[in-house]
């Protein structure tokens, strides 16, 4: 998709003044956080599991080439195909070729962030193939032609009445006077429409939460069961996954799955955990005739061994954004590309470049809440700081900020001069502000006083008073 | 007196912090009093800033330049104590990381880090302080500043000491662990987002029903005090050390000095 990450500030400004979005975000603030807290507290070994999961992924990443090759061997042995794709364009072309050879006109899709990353839907449409999203949230935003605003709850920026409105505008062949005021009725309508799409689809494309090297299997977790229908009904199943999704064994996946749903939605387990291994075997009652894995790199292998290496542990649970005060203020669309929130602030510059996504790692208070809830213990604030370091090394960022930092560093490296400047500043501001105790406006401080008062200093600096006290 | 220091007498270098030095020297004197009550001898070495503004802006070279001075200035004290979880966290958590690629300074940075503490957690966890000799009439609420909470584990210590203040009651702040939107340069780089965060925080403070807001970091306190006064919410704002040191007779942060 076309990035608007460079316009983060404008995007955020619009989001802050969008009352419908703000109403929808209220649900996020009070839903996900509390449910995750309760789920984590109910599992005594939760903290220990975080360490184990981190270690599993660290080990895998340290031997990524080896595990990917073992995975490929197993997929081939089960009768499937593996397509290694360096770039988004390669992945798109590969999928198109698979669809063309299957004579596909309709493709059903399970939820896949990688499909968003490679902008698959637009591409397939251009080529005359109809992609149909089957996850309810994805289906809603596909009708609205919007990107997802959250990695597991793609329509979290919408309210129920927005969905009703969307269905009425899109499903024009249904009676206009039908009742759609209840969530149940919305689900039923989507289910009825999707049922016919499931049966008509020639190819089913799913993402993958994990790829298992030991067995050549891929795993998806869903709450709607749409993934199962997407991958078992059509004659061709395509698994679209990025290469860091691989883990060594089924046992390892079981360990990480204990963290995933708890961190994401606060469930002990997602409603459906679906394992797929190769195409239908002789004697199988169902399953696809062809099984393809499209393995995407798209910049990830270049992060290996860098200061952003640990980002590749991410299992896309969304806990970081669910707990992020910036995300909950502006929503996911403000981030301007596929991945929002703290994980997006680290990953996005890695995938589309720091020039385009420079705001993202800067728009953080470093409050650290994301890291504290990350099931894989990814040091997200630290890596955002590393992006800021890259920007400084390259001389990016506003000149005024660089100049200000230079002036500050000059003073802060000269204690006597600094003390004098502080003494003068505090004295002047203290005298001017004494009567009211605060300033409603200050020169050069518009960023501060535009939205809040500046409390006045007490008057004399501590160091000045301390020096006097010790002279006595 | 219950405050028999658990540890032997020691020499503490007070890291004043730039915001306390400039805006709220009372907090510095409150810190000195509390440390002396805990049996420490307090010295104030030459200092400016911990270097965090440069560090968090990605300017490692300038951050190192400032941090080197701190490491040298505090080389010969037993402990370095700051009335701030943010600056304390910088010394304790980030100095070793900052100098990880510079072996000749890394050891000294680690040595400093191990001796560095946030004020209130130092009093309770290191010096074994159980109560304070202070009086404060009224209900207070307490905001957990992010760095102190998540980098240094400051949570129960201030509440424990506050409970020993005569006349004081604590009303827990809804969302006490949610960032106030200060974030150093964040609050001026992204003022609209910062404003939303501190507006939500001000609403939570108002809902707590307390007459006074306390916290352990001047950055957050200036941000919250500035928003409360802009919104006309009549809540007094103070650093927690002022109340614990029985020095809450000065005008609160952002309030007029009527003397």
Image (spheres, grey):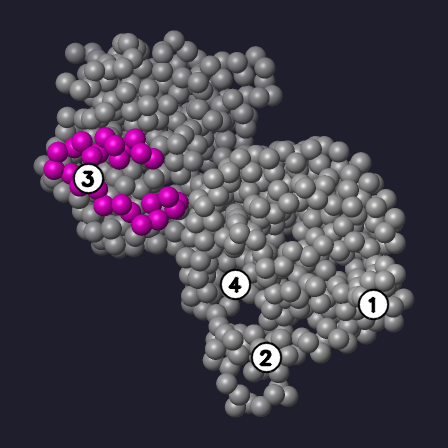
Image position of A53 (left or right of B44)? right
The residues tagged by marks 3 and 1 sit, at their Cα atoms, a distance apart of 72 Å
* Dot 1: element: loop
Residue B157 covered by magenta stretch? yes
Check the residue under mark 2 and report the chain it is in: A
Q: Position of residue B73 (x, y in %)?
A: 40, 14
**Mark positioned earlier in the residue sequence (1 or 2):** 2
The residues tagged by marks 3 and 2 sit, at their Cα atoms, a distance apart of 59 Å
Check the residue under mark 1 and report the chain it is in: A
> Can you identify the residue that label 4 sits on?
A156
- Tell us which disc is closer to us: 4 or 2: 2
Q: Nearer the viewer, residue A202 or B186?
A: A202
A376 to B196, vertically: above or below? above
- Tag 1 near tag 4, CB within 8 Å: no
> Can you identify the residue that label 1 sits on?
A235
The residues tagged by marks 4 and 2 sit, at their Cα atoms, a distance apart of 19 Å
Q: Position of residue A330 (x, y in %)?
A: 48, 57
Image position of A118 (left or right of A186)? right
Q: Tell me where residue A253 sits by quadrant.
A: top right
Residues indicated by labels 4 and 2 sit on the same polypeptide chain:
yes
The residues tagged by marks 1 and 4 sit, at their Cα atoms, a distance apart of 32 Å
> Can you identify the residue that label 2 sits on?
A189
Q: Residue at x 27, y 41 (%)?
A: B142
């Amino acid at each position: 998709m076309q990035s608007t990450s460079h316009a983060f500030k404008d995007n955020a400004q619009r989001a802050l003044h969008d009352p419908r979005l703000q109403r929808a975000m209220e649900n996020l603030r009070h839903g996900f956080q509390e449910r995750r807290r309760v789920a984590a507290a109910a599992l005594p070994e939760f903290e220990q599991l975080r360490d184990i999961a981190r270690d599993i992924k660290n080990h895998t990443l340290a031997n990524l080439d080896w595990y990917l090759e073992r995975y490929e061997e197993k997929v081939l042995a089960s009768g499937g195909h593996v397509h290694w794709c360096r770039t988004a364009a390669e992945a798109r072309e590969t999928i198109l070729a698979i669809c063309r050879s299957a004579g596909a006109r309709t493709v059903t899709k399970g939820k896949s962030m990688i499909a968003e990353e490679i902008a698959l839907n637009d591409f397939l449409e251009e080529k005359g193939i109809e992609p149909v999203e089957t996850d309810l949230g994805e289906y809603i935003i596909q009708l609205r032609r919007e990107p997802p605003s959250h990695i597991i709850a793609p329509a979290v920026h919408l309210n129920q009445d927005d969905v009703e409105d969307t269905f009425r505008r899109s499903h024009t062949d249904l009676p206009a006077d039908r009742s759609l005021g209840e969530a149940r009725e919305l689900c039923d309508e989507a289910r009825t429409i999707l049922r016919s799409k499931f049966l008509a689809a020639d190819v089913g494309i799913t993402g993958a939460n994990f790829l298992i090297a030991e067995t050549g299997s891929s795993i998806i977790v869903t709450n709607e069961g749409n993934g199962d229908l997407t991958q078992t009904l059509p004659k061709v199943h395509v698994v679209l996954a990025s290469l860091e999704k691989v883990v060594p064994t089924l046992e390892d996946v079981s360990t990480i799955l204990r963290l995933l749903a708890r961190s994401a939605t606060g469930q002990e387990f997602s409603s459906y955990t679906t394992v797929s291994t190769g195409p239908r075997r002789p004697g199988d009652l169902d399953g696809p005739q062809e099984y393809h894995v499209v393995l995407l790199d798209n910049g990830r292998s270049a992060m290996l061994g860098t200061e952003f290496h640990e980002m590749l542990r991410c299992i896309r649970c969304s806990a970081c954004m669910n707990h992020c005060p910036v995300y909950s203020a502006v929503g996911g669309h403000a981030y301007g590309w596929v991945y929002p929130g703290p994980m997006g602030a680290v990953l996005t510059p890695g995938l589309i470049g720091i020039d385009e996504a420079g705001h993202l790692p800067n728009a953080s208070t470093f409050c650290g809440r994301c890291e504290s809830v990350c099931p894989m213990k990814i040091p997200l604030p630290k890596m955002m700081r590393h992006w800021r370091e890259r920007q400084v090394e390259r001389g990016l960022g506003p000149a005024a900020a660089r100049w200000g930092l230079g002036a500050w560093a000059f003073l802060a490296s000269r204690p006597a001069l600094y003390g004098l400047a502080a003494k003068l500043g505090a004295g002047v501001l203290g005298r001017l502000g004494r009567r009211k105790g605060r300033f409603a406006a200050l020169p050069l401080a518009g960023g501060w006083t535009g939205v809040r008062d500046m409390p006045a200093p007490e008057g004399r600096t501590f160091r000045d008073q301390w020096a006097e006290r010790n002279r006595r | 007196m219950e405050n028999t220091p658990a540890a032997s007498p020691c020499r503490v270098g007070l890291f004043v912090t730039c915001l306390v030095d400039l805006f709220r020297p009372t907090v510095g004197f409150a810190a000195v009093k509390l440390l002396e009550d805990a049996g420490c001898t307090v010295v104030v070495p030459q200092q400016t800033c911990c270097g965090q503004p440069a560090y968090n802006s990605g300017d490692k070279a300038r951050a190192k330049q400032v941090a080197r001075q701190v490491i040298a200035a505090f080389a010969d004290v037993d402990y370095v104590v700051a009335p701030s979880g943010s600056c304390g966290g910088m010394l304790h958590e980030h100095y070793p990381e900052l100098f990880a690629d510079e072996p000749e300074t890394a050891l000294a940075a680690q040595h400093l880090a191990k001796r560095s503490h946030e004020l209130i957690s130092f009093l309770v966890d290191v010096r074994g302080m159980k109560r304070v000799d202070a009086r404060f009439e009224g209900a207070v609420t307490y905001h957990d500043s992010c760095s102190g909470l998540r980098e240094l584990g400051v949570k129960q210590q201030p509440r424990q000491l506050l409970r020993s203040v005569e006349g004081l009651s604590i009303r827990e702040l809804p969302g006490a662990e949610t960032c106030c939107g200060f974030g150093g340069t964040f609050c001026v780089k992204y003022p609209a987002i910062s404003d939303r965060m501190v507006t939500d925080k001000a609403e939570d403070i108002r809902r707590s029903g307390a007459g006074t807001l306390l916290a352990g970091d001047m950055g957050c306190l200036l941000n919250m005090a500035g928003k409360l006064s802009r919104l006309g919410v009549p809540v007094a704002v103070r650093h927690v050390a002022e109340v614990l040191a029985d020095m809450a007779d000065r005008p609160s942060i952002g309030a007029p000095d009527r003397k």
